[in-house]
Amino acid sequence: MRYAIFSDIHGNKEAYGAVLEALKTENLDKCYCAGDIVGYGADPSECISMTKQLNPAIVAGNHDWGATGRTDISNFSPAAKAAVIWTKDALSGSDRDYLKGLKLIYRNDFTM
């Protein structure tokens, strides 16, 4: 089985696009995202859309939940806190709903 495991996209559409383009040649069985689709970068909505199209097994990152109010950001660094607040304002309602729906634990319930 071949897997891609990635995280910390942080709203960087250009870098994420380059990674996804490179993965097209890898003949993967499954993609796993360990969170932080949003944060810091200027394209959170586009990165959420790209992730939805990929349909990976996914868990929430602290920025994903921070941008939706599901986690306390009071202990974030000043830069991270500013990024989360900006991202929260930039997201559409459906983007916020998608991030809110991410869980912290992924359980692969397959049988062999």
Image: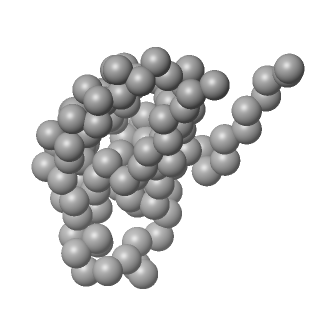
Residue at position x 85%, y 21% in the image: 111
Left or right side of 104 for 109: right
Left or right side of 59 for 23: left
x and y percentages locating residue 26 in the rendered image? 41, 24
Q: Quadrant of residue 51?
A: top left
Q: Quadrant of residue 2?
A: top right
The vertical placement of 108 against 77, above or below, is above
x and y percentages locating residue 4 in the rendered image? 48, 35
**Which coloring applies here?**
one colour
Res 4 seen here: yes
Res 90 seen here: no
Left or right side of 53 for 33: right
Q: Nearer the viewer, residue 59 or 84?
A: 59
Q: Check the image and name the residue furthest to the right.
A: 112
Q: Quadrant of residue 30?
A: top right
x and y percentages locating residue 24 in the rendered image? 34, 20
Which quarter of the figure is the C terminus placed in? top right
The vertical placement of 89 against 4, above or below, is below
Residue at position x 47%, y 70% in the image: 72
All told, the count of numbered labels is 0
Q: Nearer the viewer, residue 53 or 72?
A: 53
Residue at position x 60%, y 44% in the image: 103
Q: Nearer the viewer, residue 12 or 71?
A: 12
The vertical placement of 57 against 96, above or below, is above
Which quarter of the figure is the N terminus placed in? top right
Residue at position x 73%, y 38% in the image: 107
x and y percentages locating residue 62 in the rendered image? 45, 60
